[in-house]
Image: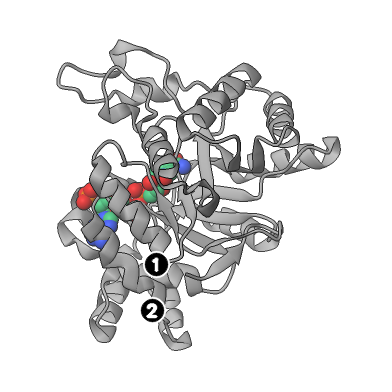
Amino acid sequence: MQTVELGRTGRQVSALALGAMQMGSETNEQDSVTILNRYLELGGSFIDTADCYEWWAHPGTPGGQSENLLGRWMRDGNKRDQVFLATKATAVPVAGPDLWAADGSANWDLARRTFSGAGAANLRYALDGSLKRLGTDHLDLYYVHVDDPATPLEETLETLDSFVKAGKVLHLGWSNVRTWRLERIRQLCERHGWTAPVALQQQHSYLRPKAGDESDSVVGAEQWGYLAAHDDLTLVAYSPILKGVYDNVPKRSSHHIMASYGGPDTDARFAAVDALAAEIGATGNQVVLAWLAQRSGPRVVPLIGPRTPEQFENVVPALDLKLTTEQIERLDAAGA
Ligand SMILES: NC(=O)c1ccc[n+]([C@@H]2O[C@H](COP(=O)([O-])OP(=O)(O)OC[C@H]3O[C@@H](n4cnc5c(N)ncnc54)[C@H](OP(=O)(O)O)[C@@H]3O)[C@@H](O)[C@H]2O)c1
């Protein structure tokens, strides 16, 4: 598998990252281990999780199932040194039993209002918990999972910097954050000599967010321009295949992930992917993953989250799919 530099750290990471969000929840242990082993066999090493994965699938718990599973997998196969390990903190909801309805469904509105946040005490508690569950003494990359405007940035940044100085974290990242906040974070780091984030984890795919999209999480034109001007930040693009919408036409109108899309160019973008996929004998998901990695502009590491080993195998050919300049330009231009 190819690698790309993380920011300007000199550290190379896999060009395709693997998300473990569903591992230990929708994906059982055996299937998770199959996916993880296969990813390593293909030369991949960049694995992503979070302390809160997946509280919503396990009523009465704060999450931790994914980190626990990864910890067992690394310990049993002595694999810690083969993994560039990323996890996140701040998005564990603390509301208690009201988070789940009687049918087990999660109350996301309540969860978002009660996220644990990026205060110093919570970050220290969260890091200790993640290290314990993952069975390691350090993380390669540690993200603020959901930006926390209620905590002074100075408190968060000084605490994160102390983790780096203590050798418990090698690199920092931020997720679900607006561009102006990112700029403020970077300015404070420069002013105080604190460790700055080198990874930005946001939702990013081939479809462009529609005008008026209010999400903190989806990369829009402004954030893309900011990344283009700051190559010391690498975009780690979560939901790069938008939960499989490129290969599944009914999902295009039914899946909640489409809430940020559906602008006037969306049909043209889907049509361009469909046409190119048919032309070159690939799937839409593979075309989109290849485009994300090969288009010009800021460096992007797609972060996929297959639920089954079959879904993982289905996107593996994207690693060898080389799009021509003309094909990339055609995809770029669709719906312009
Ligand atoms: N920072 C954040 O806030 C944040 C948010 C979300 C995710 N993440 C991270 O990013 C990772 C990936 O995110 P994601 O799970 O949203 O990414 P994704 O790969 O876009 O979506 C995963 C879903 O896509 C479908 N899928 C995957 N491969 C497929 C295939 N070959 N054919 C058809 N459908 C396929 C499956 O849907 P079905 O289950 O319906 O079959 C699967 O559950 C997560 O594991 C997590 O580590 C971070």
**Colouring scheme applied when the structure was drawn:** one colour
Q: Which mark is residue 289?
A: 1
Label 2: few (<14), some (14–19) or many (≥20) C-alpha neighbours in 10 Å:
some
Q: Where residue 182 appears, x then y in whole percent?
A: 65, 43
Residue toward you, 218 or 25: 25
Label 2: state its secondary structure. Answer: loop
Q: Where residue 219 appears, x then y in whole percent?
A: 50, 53
Q: Which mark is residue 321?
A: 2
Q: Amino acid at mark 1?
A: Leu
Q: Earlier in the sequence, mark 1 or mark 2?
A: 1
Q: Quadrant of the C terminus?
A: bottom left
Label 1: few (<14), some (14–19) or many (≥20) C-alpha neighbours in 10 Å:
many
Q: Amino acid at mark 2?
A: Leu
Quarter of the image for residue 142 reads top right
Q: Where residue 259 appears, x then y in whole percent?
A: 32, 46
Label 1, label 2: how many angstroms apart (C-alpha)? 9 Å
Q: Residue sitting at 39 percent across and 67 percent down?
A: 289
Q: Residue sitting at 37 percent across and 27 percent down?
A: 63
